[in-house]
Amino acid sequence: GLLDDRTLPFVVAPESATVRLSAAAAGDGGAAARYALPRKTCHPCLLSDMGVGLLAARCPQLLELHLTDCDALSDNGVLLLAAGCPLLHVLELRRCPLLTSAALLEMAERLPGLEVLLLGGCGEVDDTGVCAIGTRCLALRSLDVGGCSIRDESLHVLGEFAHSLSDLSIAGCFHVSSCAIRALATTRASLRTLAISRSPSCSSWFTDGLLRNLPQLELVILAAQVPPSLRWHPLPFTEFG
């Protein structure tokens, strides 16, 4: 059935350390499964900020939360969550369309121990929030910002500060250049898995060259529709020679 503020107390036990309210919570599966492109589930979550605040109050020792497809969750709910659950180290908030970089600024301030952050499909999240996470959450090892509104700045910051980062998804991030992708992949030695989408800046020539130069990297290519505004206007483009 539907999950909402009223039914939450019947679903989540008090003092829970792990809460999975997601149709496909992150786990130990393959990269393609962990970094599926944004897709609505058939069972939407109707939790509001009030419900997430209740969750934080019931589970102050929460370590891991998976919550997806929550159309009513805003930055205010994330503020309550971050303030009430300071031990969180795994957080999935995929396809929550109201979330912006303000939520990430709050996470970076209150949850410096974050290790896994999955925000695929949160289209209002941009460089401001991702850069804050990259510079403050130094234990970060897995990040999904697929479909978010990021540009090269986010990748530059992750390359410089995210020393533990091993898994990254930027699938559907069509404003990121191949030059920035290559710089991150070559300078961030910890990176083992990178999920991207084909675009004017990420041709098969580019990805083939990336793999030739970085044989330790697992490159996951996820299909995504390039926005019409970009189809005839190639983005900054760099290939391996």
Image (tube, rainbow, N blue to C red):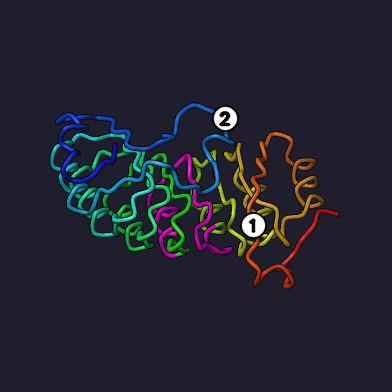
Q: Secondary structure at mark 2?
A: loop
Around disc 1, counting alpha carbons within 10 Å, would you say few (fewer than 14), some (14 to 19), or many (20 or more)? few
Q: Is residue 56 left or right of residue 40?
A: left
Q: CA distance from mark 1 to mark 2?
A: 23 Å
Residue at x 17%, y 36% (from the top left corner): 59
Residue where numbered disc 1 is placed: 225
Q: Nearer the viewer, mark 1 or mark 2?
A: 1
- In the picture provided, is 124 more to the left or to the right than 109? right
> Would you place residue 79 above or below residue 214 in this image?
below
Residue 91, image x, y percentages: 36, 42
Q: Position of residue 24 (x, y in %)?
A: 44, 35
**Where is 238 relative to 57, above or below?**
below
Quarter of the image for residue 235 reads bottom right
The magenta span reads 128-154
Q: Are marks 1 and 2 in contact (CB under 8 Å)?
A: no
Toward the top, the furthest residue is 28
The residue located at (50%, 58%) in the rendering is 148
Dot placed on the residue nearer the N-terminal end, 1 or 2: 2
Q: Is residue 47 magenta?
A: no
Residue named by callout 2: 30
In front: 227, or 146?
Answer: 227
Task: Indicate the amino acid at tag 1.
Answer: Gln
135 magenta-colored: yes
Residue shown at the point (18%, 46%) measured from the top left: 5
Residue sitting at the far right: 241
